[in-house]
Image: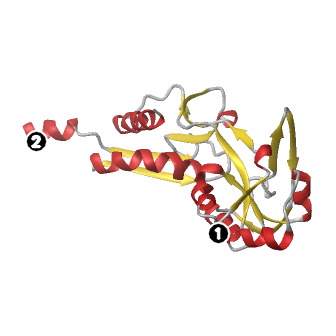
Amino acid sequence: MSSLKALRARPAGKVRINSVEHASQAILWPSLRGVMAEYPDIEIEIIDDYRLVGIVAGRFDAGVRLEQQVDQDMTALRIGPDFRQVIVCAPGYVAARGLPQVPQDLLAHDAVMLRLPRSGGLYPWSFARDGQELTVRPKGRGIFNTVALLQQAAMDGLGFVSLPEDLVAGLIAEEHLVRMLADWSLLRPGYHLYCPSRRQPSPAFAIVLEALRRFRG
């Protein structure tokens, strides 16, 4: 009986989260790997998808997106800080092609672009400075649908790429990449984890939520 009670008291089950690569790398895995180590009966499945998937229809327990992408009828928890989107490229590319002075100059350069699965279009680059906002759509010489390939192609000198600052800060410090147009960098709102407001969280999901709250600080 004591073994049965201990088993019932031990959280178990699967938690499925629909997310995007940046949030998974920067927030979900750093905060949830400890959960998997501490609770061997909890399974965590993270699916990266740039489409706005219906989490109920997709049988997900929760989703992770930027604040403005979360429907108002969802319960949402902020799980990450605001972050800047930055433009970077390899030092060799700058030496060969020169520096852009304003965002519009990027139209004359090669770029490494992200393909959006839902619309089939390319992810536009947004900029802001002194209250002015603008969007630029450079020519995609290399087009991919994963952050890893975007980053590697830029390091290999294929052209400029737009990525979250925290993903490339180390590469910039080590001079593998060079940051451009810093005063035009767009500040994006932090990621939110969201789920249907009427859903009662399972014990496993409650532990995931608490881990994300602690990681958020």
Residue pointed to by mark 1: 152
Q: Badges 2 and 1: C-beta atoms under 8 Å apart?
A: no
Query: Which residue position holds label 2?
Result: 3
Task: Tell me: residue 42, above or below residue 180.
Answer: above
Using residue 3 as the reference point, say whether residue 114 is left or right of it: right
Q: Please name the amino acid that badge 1 sits on.
A: Gln
Which quadrant, please, contains the C terminus? top left
| Residue 199 in view here | yes
**Nearer-N-terminus badge (2/1):** 2
| Residue 20 at least partly seen | no
Residue 2 quadrant:
top left
Residue type at tag 2? Ser
Q: Between marks 2 and 1, how big is the CA–CA gap? A: 51 Å
**Based on the displayed image, in which of its 4 quarters is residue 146 positioned?**
bottom right
- Identify the image quadrant of the N terminus: top left
Label 1: few (<14), some (14–19) or many (≥20) C-alpha neighbours in 10 Å: some
SS class, disc 1: helix
